[in-house]
Amino acid sequence: MTTPNVPLAGVIGAPIAHSKSPQLHGHWLRQLGLRGHYIPMHVQPEDLGEVLRTLPKMGFRGINVTIPHKERVMELADLITDRATLIGAANTIIFRSDGKIHADNTDGYGFIQNLRQQAPDWNPKAGPAVVLGAGGAARAVVAALIEAGVQDIIVTNRTRIRAEQLHDEFGKRVRVADWIQAGNLLEQATTVVNTTSLGMQGKPEMRVPLDGLRRGTVVSDLVYVPLETRLLRTAAERGCICVDGLGMLLHQAVPAFERFFGMRPTVDDSTRAAILR
């Protein structure tokens, strides 16, 4: 009689000590009463290929991927989902039983699920969405907004050419505006999303004028340290519906956990409490 192997999964990055993923997956393993381990692993870029070939031999079912490996793993994967291809990065790797490496990106899924949970009356067709920033997180957000049915997305970024690249890749639903106009854009927006690091602990504050925020506008900030940024604090004062960034981190992990350990977890108050402790 053989004993089944204990499922293994983890997260790779450089650095990785700051990651909350082990805390999150550990909470779900305990909550669901599942056997398994989720391990943080510091992996240097030059070792990435060797690590991806070795982990399946050690019993790993898959891994999450963070900076600086999210683009590079795409080059090493055998199969890539459409959404990962569209975003140009992967955050989840599955080691299939046939030996193939499968890359996916669940960031957009996590963003939309968080939006719908914290702002359940959000209507994607209500009006324009303004996206601040044009990096990897913005790509995931824009793709998710388009899939959800938002017809008009205005992207503004301190470096305009990066915003123009999103317009070129996503098409006519995406418009580009100069960063200096960001404050004015808020007056027409029904959804506002900050995908930049502005306002994050240790980063510069967001200096975009927020006077244009209107009551009822859904305002989402992907930053979750601190949980209440200046953007969200001001938005709350102006009667907006605020969506913090922690929920996106939690929701994007749901599909990965299910693939790693065979059960789908729920993002609830206890999940948030486990991460905030």
Image (cartoon, rainbow, N blue to C red):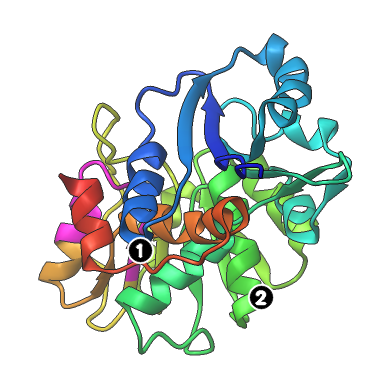
Query: Does residue 134 show up magenta in the picture?
Result: no
Q: How many marks?
A: 2
Q: Quadrant of residue 90?
A: top right
What is the number of the mark on residue 147?
Answer: 2
Magenta span of residues: 219-233
Dot 1 corresponds to which residue?
220
Say which of 69 and 78 sits in front. 78
Say which of 49 and 260 sits in front. 260
1 and 2 marks in contact (CB < 8 Å): no
Local packing at callout 2 (Cα closer than 10 Å; few below 14, some 14-19, many 20+) is some
Q: Quadrant of residue 146?
A: bottom right
**Residue at position x 36%, y 44% from top?**
26
Relative image position of residue 208 (x, y in whole percent): 31, 50
**Residue at position x 66%, y 42% from top?**
2
- Give the spatial CA distance, label 1 vs label 2: 17 Å
Instruction: Name the element at disc 2.
Output: helix
**Residue at position x 37%, y 22% from top?**
17
Amino acid under disc 1 = Ser
Establish if 36 lies above or below 70: below
On screen, residue 6 versus residue 102, left or right, reads left
On screen, residue 66 versus residue 123, left or right, reads right
Name the image quarter holding the C terminus.
top left
Establish if 220 lies above or below 107: below
Is residue 188 in view? no
Relative image position of residue 239 (x, y in whole percent): 16, 78
Establish if 208 lies above or below 49: below
Instruction: Name the element at disc 1.
Output: strand
What is the number of the mark on residue 150?
Answer: none
Local packing at callout 1 (Cα closer than 10 Å; few below 14, some 14-19, many 20+) is many
Amino acid under disc 2 = Glu
Relative image position of residue 186 (x, y in whole percent): 37, 68
On screen, residue 88 versus residue 37, left or right, reads right
